[in-house]
Image: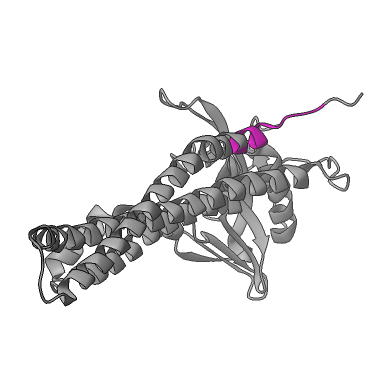
Amino acid sequence: MSKISLKSSWLFLLIPIGIIYFVVVPELEAKYKGYNNNQVTLQKDIQTLDSLKQLNTLTRSGEHLIKKLGITVPIHKKVYGKEKFLFYKTGGMLLVLVFMGIGMVTTSYLSNKKKTVPKNKQVDFTFEDPDNDLIGKQTSWDALESSGSNFASEVYKKTVQGYKITASSFTKVFAWSFFLIGLNYVAISFYEYYQTYDIPLTFMKGGKLFFTSGGPFLLVGILLLFMFSPKVFINTLKRKIIVDGKIIPFNEVYSLQVLEKFTEGGSSSGSYFSYELNLITSKGTRHNLLNHGDKTYILSDMMKISKLLKVPVWNKGVA
């Protein structure tokens, strides 16, 4: 009998699926059923009100009913209209959450599968000793980046002009989820306003509506998408590297440096090791290329970049 292996990534996916299927969906179905019943009642009241208005003479009970419906029908139209837009907002948010869950699990699965394919064999790599080099002796081994992650948050990818280092698909799914949740609420909220109110939307009212709906999520999403945009470009045709807003020719690259750093997590997250791959110029200046917590990927990308630039790698303690 083969042993069943339950990966943590799939367990992560089961949690939101269970909450949505057993809690959220039944609750939405009940609310939607109530909404439909209210709509049927409202349409009957509208028809009754129209019929009463067409009568030339009304009984006392008819006069009372027409006054009552004249008050309740407009109120119910407004209330049930808000419920309809609330369903749109909630449904849109659920779709984004499903996209986020599936996207994160899928990208995590593909990333792990890529590391374990048979063609990925262990390759011996010889590091050079920085203590035998003048620039190496003067090079700092403190981390360049104060932040870090415990997964492969950055990737080294091929482009038309060479290579780039950018955020991983897993990280981008997170950023896009913030953006889409905010966009969903903002777009539907503005549409609801124009459908419900006859009052013109002023700048102040528009700003209030933006920031009280999904505006903050939308802005955070845009900020994250900018933060997760490519940070390094390696142009193999022009033989230059763009990093930290500077252009570094290939012939000014002296070495690569790989180092390990320890990040202490807070009460909600554990501590972990992460790694940096830094570029060192002939002047001894360091520039960060990669910064994440997947040692297998960072060592693999280190070998590729070292071979491309034809420079040695200095390493202290990363095995």
Q: Measuring 22% from the left and 67% from the top, which residue is drawn there?
A: 196
- Residue 225: quadrant of the picture: bottom left
Q: Quadrant of the C terminus?
A: top right
Task: Please tell me which residue lies in front, 43 or 51.
Answer: 51
Compared with 25, 1 (above or below) is above
- Looking at the image, the residue that sits furthest to the right is 1
- Residue 134: quadrant of the picture: top right
Percent across and percent down for residue 99 are 55, 52
Q: Measuring 51% from the left and 59% from the top, which residue is drawn there?
A: 231
Q: Is residue 221 magenta?
A: no
Q: Is residue 246 visible?
A: yes
Q: Measuring 22% from the left and 71% from the top, which residue is drawn there?
A: 51
Percent across and percent down for residue 76 are 23, 57
Task: Please tell me which residue lies in front, 182 or 128.
Answer: 182
Task: Please tell me which residue lies in front, 130 or 202.
Answer: 202
Colour pattern: one colour
Query: From the viewer's perspective, is 115 left or right of 153?
Result: right
- Residue 188: quadrant of the picture: bottom left
Percent across and percent down for residue 21 are 55, 39
Q: Is residue 260 visible?
A: no
Kindly report the secondary structure that dominates the magenta region of the rendered protein. helix
Percent across and percent down for residue 258 are 62, 41
Q: Quadrant of the N terminus?
A: top right
Q: Which residues are magenta?
A: 4-13
